Amino acid sequence: MSLRQGRIGTYEAVAMTAMALFFYGVFAIDPAFAYTAGNSVYAAIPLSIGLSLGIFLLYYAAMKKSRSRDLYDLLTYSVGRAGAGIVSAMLIAMLLICAYIPTSRLITLLNAFVFVTRHYEYMCVYLIPVVGVIVFLGFETISRMSLFYAPLIFLATLAAAAAAFPSYQTYRLYPLFGDGVFHMLEFAVSDTVMFIPPLFGILVAGRTIQGLGKAKRAAIYSGVIAIGICAVTLFALALVFDYKELTPIRIPLYRINMRLPQSHVFVRLDKLGIFIWLAGAILSSIYTLYIAAILYARTFSQGDVRPAAAALGALLLSVIQAGQGKLHQSFYDAINFLHRYGYYVVLPVLLLVAGIGLIKRGRPEGNEKN
């Protein structure tokens, strides 16, 4: 089976995964749900990433016990080929959502505040060659580009947070924990559903990362990095905006410097940052897209991942390009519904699969020939 995965090291896997976790944690928050009666997101998002990392480690233990070489091996071992197909379809859908939200929001933001005279659809056309070329080059190219670009993403984010220091006020943190710890925990658990897919990408491409040991290290490192960066960034936003101001803002990080005087040297840092963040979001979308394609190819025993990557890429670009006006809002309404309530279905299924893998005896069927 030629999945064009190549061979990558721990650093490349960490860069890809940490970047994807960061973009979903900071750029894909549903403000109407997150800031209902206060701001506790700076605590809830790191907790959510930690919970997702815990589920990853549960799957790691099940894979190690069952001697599975990648996630699909574990799925077939635990619930058979039919059950594995159902769980794979669920994970593929979640991966595509993770690919869609950050990129579509940044393009919408770029259209609203930078290229205001250009049509949204014309801007999306420029994504086609970028996504097409990188997907065709394969997983190893995606990982090398992520290793180069991830530090720039994080430096740009920390620079934006540091530049807003004169606007920090601790009174904006109140009421602490919003309408209570329960709401914070509810938000953390619901968001876990969207942090699991990027982490599971390490297990889907387990052969590429050259062993479960390296996969575990990559997940832990990327989780810790994402927790740190997300916590700092979201806490900085909480010091600049109160929760009532944050509720209508889709991507508050872009507007973190809006309170600075117009003569301030960093007042237009957001214009530079949005292009850096957009490039990183596109690269993270390609990562989750390619992971979805690999899982699809494994599920349906396809010998080449490129047809699946091309089809899923075309679907993703079509949805992004159509994401304006009423259709745009319909996409987000559907995604936000899954985001808020989908964990009632997703988490029990994932925990059941891991539990079966931990208690079942024997090796996965067909593992010797994979």
Image: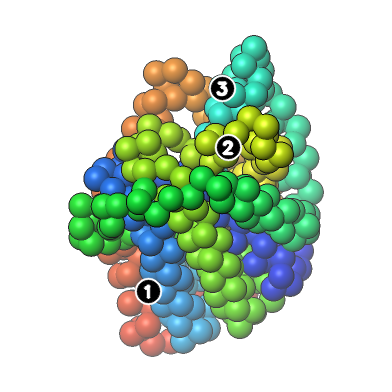
Number of marks in the image? 3
Residue situated in front as seen by the camera: 351 or 49:
49
Could you tell me the amino acid type at mark 3? Ala
Circles 3 and 1: CB atoms closer than 8 Å: no
> Who's the residue at 67% across and 62% down the image?
15
Which quadrant holds residue 123? top right
How far is mark 3 from mark 2, CA to CA?
21 Å
Could you tell me the amino acid type at mark 2? Leu
Residue 331: x %, y % from top left: 40, 30
Residue 350: x %, y % from top left: 35, 65
Viewer can see residue 38 = yes
Q: Residue 165 carries which label?
A: none
For residue 341, above or below residue 229:
above
The numbered mark, 3 or 1, whose residue comes first in the sequence reads: 3
In this rendering, the label closer to the viewer, 3 or 1:
3
Return the residue at label 2: 260
In this rendering, the label closer to the viewer, 1 or 2:
2
Quadrant location of the C terminus in the rendered image: bottom right
Viewer can see residue 315 = no
> Who's the residue at 78% across and 40% down the image?
133
Q: In this view, does 292 lie to the left or right of 47?
A: right
Quadrant location of the N terminus in the rendered image: bottom right
Helix, strand, or loop for circle 1? helix
Return the residue at label 3: 112
Circles 3 and 2: CB atoms closer than 8 Å: no
Return the residue at label 1: 354
Residue density around tag 1, few if under 14, some if 14–19, many if 20 or more, within 10 Å: many
Which quadrant holds residue 367? bottom right
Helix, strand, or loop for circle 2? loop
Could you tell me the amino acid type at mark 1? Ala
